[in-house]
Amino acid sequence: MSENKKLKFPDGFLWGASNSAYQIEGGCVNNWSEWEKVNAGRLAKEARGKWQLWQQEQFPEMFEAQNYISGRACDHYNLYEKDFDSAKELGHNAHRFSLEWSRIEPEEGKFSPEGIEHYRKVLQALRVRGIEPMVTLWHWTNPLWLEKKGGCESRDFAPALARYAQYAVEQLGDLAEFWVTLNEPTAVLAMAYVKGVWPPQKKNPVAVWRVYRHLARAHNLAYDAMHSVSEKFQVGFSHNMFYYEPNNHRSWLDRALVRVIEYFANERFFRMTPGKHDFIGLQYYFHSRFKFPGLLRNDNLDLNDLAWEIYPEGIYHLLKGLQKYNLPIYITENGLADKTDARREKFIKDHLAQVHRAIQEGVNVRGYLYWSLLDNFEWDKGFWPRFGLVAVDYQTLERKIRPSALKYAEICKNNSLDI
Ligand code: FCB
């Protein structure tokens, strides 16, 4: 007979979910909202060549241009109290969200009192529900004035982010201790400047180096600016890390290739921002195997709705690798696109079991924030991928808690996982 085991998490562990402004608020005006207007039709047309047949059958909305227009999204801008009621009901004691920079600084150097007032209310709404906020400053969207100057390619990007960071903590710092400067800087590098598929769609090696430098500088300057206001702030960034493996562990060519890729994707940003981390935000979605000279086709058939491989063990290896930095680690994103909700509960439990394994081996993990609280606008893929613990009907804006969310709630409330 198999025995039940209880995996207990450390006291004070943060449990909750993440979201970002542009993906849920609605009514955002920034570099992405401008880009989507020009590209929605093209993205709808390209869907047939891009997605597999089973995905096309399950998600016919991918052929409609409307799918790629964020519009009012989940109208979270107006419905945040309702959404935080759900988070509370689900036993969450933490929540990560992002500020929409363009609402706070609609014109260069001119901060908007209404913009900041809105986020004070958002933070207060979390606090009264006993939910610890974690605030992201930059979740990929640039105000238009900055985009006009070249966005992340502009020399002004880093000082502008630092100025906005300082203002944000001066105005909101009494309500939030945890701050994420940048969300996944390397994802923007890869998708916007290496592959050239996200705005500003610049496939250019010179831009890659420039943007890498600017993002790292932005983090460093923002870190210092926020600490100049108060040492109490916990400042870090959220890192999209891949678990890479050599196809053949005995092949030195495969191993060398993995090392090089790991360096650029996982390590380099840390090296460019030494001493500027109070914690590490780990975001885990991907596992890849390399066979020299390239990437191996994924032969794992356990896939999410986006055909991303499900590989829970990867998070354990990444956590072990991060141990050398000797910093508290929060998992600031990990989640599954699963419209039918058939696999989300298992996904969460399998990943948490691996997180627990790392904790048992001494890794200082202090929180897990599932991506995401709500279904949302998934960037260039639009609305069809469904990551939410809470399903959203985009016609009526009705919210419905998914069954897996209730299972996750038990874990959050008990601070332990039964397996
Ligand atoms: C992450 C992003 C987040 C969301 C998830 C699925 O890379 O930070 O906004 O799109 O992927």
Image (tube, grey):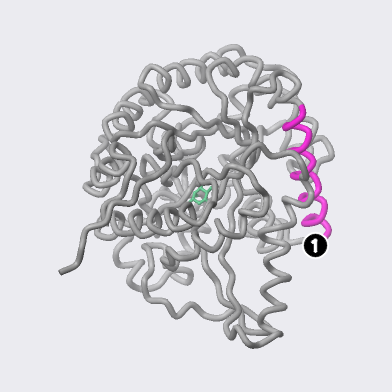
**Residue situated in front as seen by the camera: 68 or 299:** 299
Which SS does the magenta portion mostly show? Answer: helix
Q: Is mark 1 within 8 Å of ligand 1?
A: no
Q: Amino acid at mark 1?
A: Pro
Which residue shows up at 58% across the image and 42% down it?
Answer: 328
- Can you say whether 271 is above or below 133 in the image? below
In the rendered image, the quadrant that contains the C terminus is bottom left
Residue closer to the observer: 147 or 104: 104
Residue where numbered disc 1 is placed: 205
Q: Is residue 396 above or below residue 59?
A: above
Tell me what residue is drawn at x 56 percent, y 49 percent. 282
Q: Locate residue 89, reporting x and y percent.
A: 26, 30
Q: Is residue 70 left or right of residue 154?
A: left
Q: How far from the left and from the top, in percent, is residue 9?
A: 39, 44
Judge whether residue 213 is colored magenta: yes
Residue at the spot 65% in from the left edge and 47% down from the top edge: 326
Using the image as rendered, state which of residue 320 and residue 394 is in the foreground.
Answer: 320
Q: Quadrant of residue 191?
A: bottom right
Identify the magenta region: 205-224
Lateral position of residue 228 relative to residue 280, left or right? right
- Find residue 395 and report its horizontal and vertical position in percent: 29, 39
Observer-nearest of 180 and 252:
252
